[in-house]
Amino acid sequence: MRSLLISDKAIETIEPGARLLRGFAGGEAAELVEEVARIATLAPFRQMVTPGGFRMSVAMTNCGGLGWITDRKGYRYEPRDPDSGAAWPDMPTRFRALADRAAEAAGFAGFAPDSCLINRYVHGARMSPHQDRDEKDFAAPIVSVSLGLPATFLWGGSKRGDRPKRFRLESGDVVVWGGDARLNFHGVDTLAQGDGTCRYNLTFRKAK
Ligand code: SIN
Ligand code: FE2
């Protein structure tokens, strides 16, 4: 099991419940990106609109039994892609296995994600600080995998106004947060131009 091979030094504690696993997915980044491309042929990336009417700079798609969406009616999980009416593509075995291993390595054994939101950031895209709170219960952690261009992750506190810590996330880095940190604010600073076209982020959740 890969989680047993990773040295403790590679696991950084951001705060109780939040861990950064540097390079955890590095060995399979290319295969993960291939899966993203395949999913995007079935459920293309799209820039969704917030309930307030703003178009997000990040383009999104999903795989798994449920997908996170936003439109003028609100934020929620849906079993179908609203653009096509079809079920979201299945979660690849490789995705599920990685999410389970990362959760376990971070101290959350038995994670059973039913949803994977896939974010695509191009130069200039950002995600403002928010809480992940559309899931039914907050007992399960969030597992977040970075692929492609590096980004600055903003890790805030339990209140919107708390000044965020900044972490550089490289391709293959995984952040896991749960427990007391499950509802912390987090976001991504404006993506800088780099050696590549975009950054992908896989965010695994147990939505139901
Ligand atoms: C998210 O909070 O959904 C995205 C985080 C990231 O892109 O690293
Ligand atoms: Fe989030």
Image (cartoon, rainbow, N blue to C red):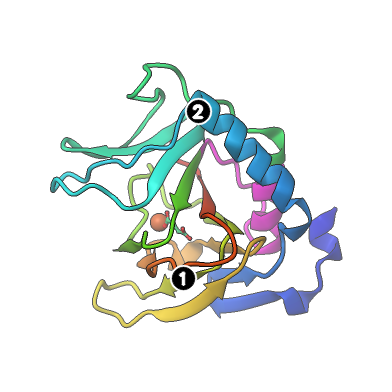
Q: Nearer the viewer, residue 6 or 58?
A: 58
Decide whether residue 105 is among the magenta residues. yes
Q: Nearer the viewer, residue 100 or 33?
A: 33
> Mark 1 CB in 8 Å range of ligand 1?
yes
Quick one: which residue is furthest to the top in this view?
A: 85
Q: Position of residue 54 (x, y in %)?
A: 18, 49
Q: Which residue is mark 2?
A: 65
Quick one: which residue is furthest to the left in this view?
A: 52
* Residue at image location 24% in from the left, 77% down from the top: 161
User: Given the image, on which type of amino acid does mark 1 rest?
Assistant: Phe
Q: Position of residue 35 (x, y in %)?
A: 65, 37
At label 2, counting other C-alpha atoms closer than 10 Å, the crowd grade (few under 14, some 14-19, many 20 or more) is many
Q: CA distance from mark 1 to mark 2?
A: 27 Å
At label 1, counting other C-alpha atoms closer than 10 Å, the crowd grade (few under 14, some 14-19, many 20 or more) is many
Whether residue 192 is situated above or below residue 145 in the rendered picture:
below
Could you tell me how many numbered marks the image carries? Answer: 2
**Which comes sooner in the sequence, label 1 or label 2?**
2
Q: Position of residue 31 (x, y in %)?
A: 73, 43
* Residue at image location 32% in from the left, 53% down from the top: 57
User: Given the image, on which type of amino acid does mark 2 rest?
Assistant: Gly
Whether residue 45 is situated above or below residue 202 in the rendered picture:
above
> Mark 2 CB in 8 Å range of ligand 1?
no
Secondary element at tag 1: strand
> Mark 1 or 2, which is nearer the eye?
1
Decide whether residue 9 is among the magenta residues. no
State which region is magenta: 97-115
Quarter of the image with the C terminus is top left
Disc assigned to residue 172: none
Q: Quadrant of ligand 1?
A: bottom left
Q: Is residue 33 visible?
A: yes
Q: Which residue is mark 1?
A: 153
* Residue at image location 41% in from the left, 73% down from the top: 154
